Each structure stands twice: as structure tokens, then as C-alpha cells.
Amino acid sequence: MRSETGVRLPVIDFSKQELKPGSPDWDSVKVQVREALEEYGCFEASFDKVADVRDVLFGAMEELFDLPKQTKQLCTSDKPFSGYHDATAKLLRESMMIDEAHIPGNIDRGLTNILWPQGNISFSKTIVSFTQLAAGLEKTVRRMLLESFGVEKYMDELNDATNYTLRAIKYGRQRTGEPTLGADAHTDKGMLTVLYQNEVHGLEIRTRDGEWIDIKPSPKSFIIMNGESLGAWLNGRLSAPYHRVVTKGNKVRYSVAFFANPRGGYRVKVPEELVDDKNGLLFKPFDYEEYLQYYSVRAARGDFTTDLKVYSNA
């Protein structure tokens, strides 16, 4: 059921110039971040700088998805959920994902030069600018979380073990006025997700009470969402929220999802500081890409309820 209670996600301001580790503003925001992720698994992050790239970003999304289908199909990948995925009879959603999006030059090599052999400098610059903003914000949120749980000494290790992937998504126009499912209810599998969308809403989050609430972020805001792998690394202290997309009306919805995922080969392992007599070990070490491969097989059958705790302890 959808909530009629007017529940809103917490809005946390990350635009302050004084937001530096150890400062009063930093410590205040750090508390808000932990409380929001403990309660909702996500929050709205106000971040003024994103307004500088908003128009060109969604212009680039339109340019990308307006390419001929046979051109978009040139973007392929052996990894689950990567490369180009076309709309289906069930879901009017197209997506394009690029791996290692944070590595300099990889936007060109893995995306732009494939789709535009003659080059498209403006497209690459736009995606790189957005990626830098999203990665900077994700690192800030992650550092705050690690400090909050007293395990900040692992920050460098996690940074080195992180693979950032970027997914551009288009939800097509509806042929009827009825709400249409654009993305099935699911949880994100990585560490943290940074979401940004155009003016067409549709994202819904499921609360602890099982109600679905509409998320309508400001044009200057990201949605920060906890992933299963971070919850596991923190030994169950945070949960990943179920979310879906339900589109309405005849406008195209564009969104960009920026995922911070554990790199393949890195064993996601609960820090010893988070295991004691009161908090037994809930998750055994696991390889994220092996888990994602397992999940992708289940998802292809329509099962989006895979339990990471069960998987890691199997």
C-alpha cells in the first residue's frame, strides 16, 4: 500500500563550505546521516553543486537514448546488469551501465567512443563532471558512517576496494494515464548508491511498516541509499531499503544511478571491532561479484528477494 501520512525522507544539507572532518558542522551532519540510514536506509542529500550540471546532464541522457537501437546495443558486458538493456513488454525502461566509471578516460573508452566513433567531447565531459560530484559525496557519506561506528581506520582499504559503476536510465512515456511499474521492488547490492533524477518523479521507498512512500527530491538533491554489502560489512547495523519506480503521465523520466560496489576479488569481511559477545558474526566473508552473479540468475527468474545473510553463510 502507498502511504497517505505525508512521510518524507530526512533532508540533510551537504552544501556547507565548513563541512570538513572534525568541524561542528561535520559532526552534526554525521549524526543525521547515521540516524537517517538506521531509520529509512536512505535520505535526501541537498548538494547545491549538482545544479551546475543538471541541464547538461539530462540533455546528455536524451542524446544517449535517442541513438539508434543498434548503436546502443554496441555497449556490451559480461558482467551482470552492465552494458545496454532495452525496454521490455513489462517495463518501459532502457538502461546503459558503465563499469569503473571513476577511472580517468574510462568514460571515453567504455562508452563515448563506442557510441560515437567520431568522438563526443561534450558528452564525456558532462558524465565525468557528474561522476566526480557523486563520487565525492559518496566518500563523504561513507567516511561519516565509518567514523560514527568507530571503524574509520578502514576508510583507505574500502576506497581502494571500491568499483564505481554508473547507470543511465530512461523510463518511456506511458500510453495510458494509469501508474505503471518502471522498476520492480528490490534492494541495491553494493555499498552505497547515489541517485539523481529529472523533474519526473516515480521513486518509491518501502518503510519498516511496509508502506510505500513517494520520493520527490529537490532538483538540487541526490538520494543516498544504503546497499546490502555495506549492511553486511557493518554486521547488520544498517539495512538496505526496498525501492521501486512507478511512473505516471506521458513525460519521459531520466535518472542516473551511481553505485559504489566492492571490487571483484575483494572479500567483504565484517571488521573485528563490530563483533563481540552482544553482536555475533552475522555475515561470513564473501566476494561481491560472485554474489551479484548469483543474484542476477535469481532476478532473471523474477526473484528479487535474495537474502545476503543466507548466501554468505551457505
Image (cartoon, rainbow, N blue to C red):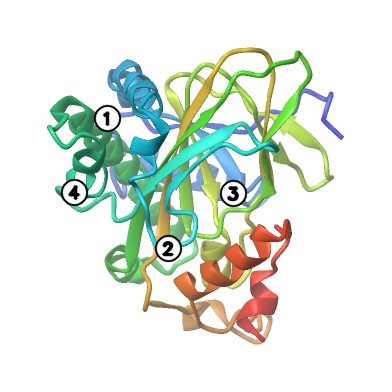
Question: Closer to the N terminus: mark 2 or mark 1?
Answer: 1
C-alpha span from label 4 to label 3: 35 Å
Mark on residue 105? none
- Mark 4 burial class by Cα count in 10 Å: few <14, some 14-19, many 20+: few
Tag 3: amino acid: Leu
Instruction: Give the structural element (helix, strand or loop) at label 4.
Output: helix
C-alpha span from label 1 to label 4: 34 Å
Residue drawn at (61%, 60%) of the image: 238
Residue 60 is situated, as x and y percent measured from the top left of the image, at 31, 24
Q: Quadrant of residue 134?
A: top left
Tell me whether circle 2 and circle 4 mark residues in contact (CB < 8 Å). no
Question: Closer to the N terminus: mark 4 or mark 3?
Answer: 3
Question: Closer to the N terminus: mark 2 or mark 3?
Answer: 3
Question: Which residue does the numbered mark 4 point to in the structure image?
Answer: 109
Residue drawn at (52%, 40%) of the image: 86
- Which mark lies nearer to you, 1 or 4? 4
Mark on residue 17? 1
Tag 1: amino acid: Gln
Residue 239 is situated, as x and y percent measured from the top left of the image, at 64, 58
